[in-house]
């Protein structure tokens, strides 16, 4: 027992788990958190209870961490062929596959404990969240549209946020869910554009590959549909000036992202992906200000 504790809980080991959970790169947490906050504030028609904010924020963190761990486990024989990922903890041999599965289980258990503080409807919805998080990493082997599954997984906190507060999922929640999936497909395609050449060599599928030379145009269509969808949501919930203004400012970021991906350079495509953090944030600021007393 002492040997096990010494091996798995050394400072270096914990640091590798930290890297495996991408705690050094919080962009994924932010991209998952903003739609969650959109949903919580719209469902509450104001500032949601602090308990819900804390539960969902922590849930976002641990589920994103779980997703990173299971993704690296699934890709452990693929990541070593990609320059950007070849030094990740599992593929580099610094964390064993069974350790990763154990860490994934801890994250999932933590998320389930958090959701137990919510109503039964939300608890039942959490099982779908687990299924989506578990199957997403394997989709790139079977379909060119793994980004859609990622979008479904990343957006699932939206119906959960409404269910937690209203014990119901109104139509506007599903509209928000769908348009958020479109947004996620757009920015994860930018992410995939950065790895397209290497993915083609090793046979990994993605929207960046299937879209081919139409990638920028399709991303623009997805961005346009997302923006139109957000304006329709603002209208449906009778949003005020700040709600509309937040969406309008987000368009500036979408245009900037198109500028970044114009030459399909790997570095600038990745920068465009990262820029979506600010897009999600300005929409939330608009929603937040809209619902101030």
Image: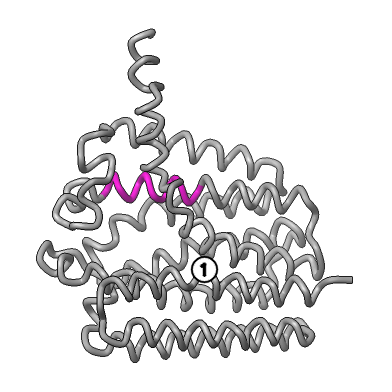
Locate residue 224, reporting x and y percent: 49, 90
- Above or below 132: residue 175: below
Mark 1: secondary structure: helix
Q: Is 78 left, or right, of 168 in this rendering?
A: left
Locate residue 179, reporting x and y percent: 53, 79
- Above or below 147: residue 17: above
Locate residue 85, reporting x and y percent: 24, 53
| Closer to the camera in the image, 212 or 172 | 212
| Closer to the camera in the image, 218 or 30 | 30
Locate residue 134, reporting x and y percent: 39, 50
| Closer to the camera in the image, 46 or 150 | 46
Q: Is residue 71 magenta?
A: yes
- Above or below 18: residue 189: below
Give the position of the C terminus as an image quadrant: bottom right
Q: Is 179 left, or right, of 199 in this rendering?
A: right
- Above or below 142: residue 254: below
| Closer to the camera in the image, 236 or 76 | 76
Q: Badge 1 is on which residue?
A: 277
Q: Is residue 280 magenta?
A: no
Residue appearing at x 58%, y 60% in the figure: 33
Residue appearing at x 42%, y 39% in the figure: 18
Quadrant of residue 279 in the image? bottom right
Identify the magenta region.
Answer: 63-74
Give the position of the N terminus as an image quadrant: top left
């Amino acid at each position: 027992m002492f040997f096990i504790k010494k091996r798995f809980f050394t400072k270096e080991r914990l640091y590798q788990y930290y890297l495996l959970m991408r705690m050094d790169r919080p962009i994924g947490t932010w991209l998952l958190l903003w739609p969650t906050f959109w949903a919580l504030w719209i469902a509450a028609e104001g500032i949601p209870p602090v308990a819900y904010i804390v539960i969902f924020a922590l849930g976002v963190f641990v589920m994103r961490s779980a997703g990173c761990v299971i993704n690296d486990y699934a890709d452990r024989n693929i990541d070593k062929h990609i320059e950007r990922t070849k030094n990740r903890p599992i593929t580099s041999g610094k964390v064993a596959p069974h350790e990763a599965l154990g860490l994934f289980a801890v994250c999932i258990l933590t998320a389930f404990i958090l959701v137990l503080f919510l109503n039964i409807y939300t608890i039942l919805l959490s099982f779908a969240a687990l299924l989506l998080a578990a199957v997403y990493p394997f989709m790139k082997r079977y379909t060119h549209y793994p980004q859609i599954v990622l979008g479904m997984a990343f957006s699932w906190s939206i119906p959960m946020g409404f269910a937690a507060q209203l014990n119901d999922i109104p139509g506007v929640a599903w509209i928000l869910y769908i348009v958020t999936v479109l947004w996620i497909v757009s920015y994860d395609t930018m992410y995939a554009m950065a790895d397209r050449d290497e993915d083609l060599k090793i046979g990994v599928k993605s929207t960046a590959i299937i879209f081919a030379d139409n990638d920028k145009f399709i991303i623009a269509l997805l961005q346009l549909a997302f923006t139109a969808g957000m304006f329709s949501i603002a209208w449906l919930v009778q949003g005020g000036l700040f709600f509309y203004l937040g969406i309008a400012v987000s368009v500036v970021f979408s245009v900037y992202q198109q500028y970044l991906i114009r030459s399909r350079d790997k570095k600038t495509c990745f920068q465009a992906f990262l820029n979506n953090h600010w897009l999600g944030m300005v929409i939330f600021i608009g929603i937040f200000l809209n619902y101030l007393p």
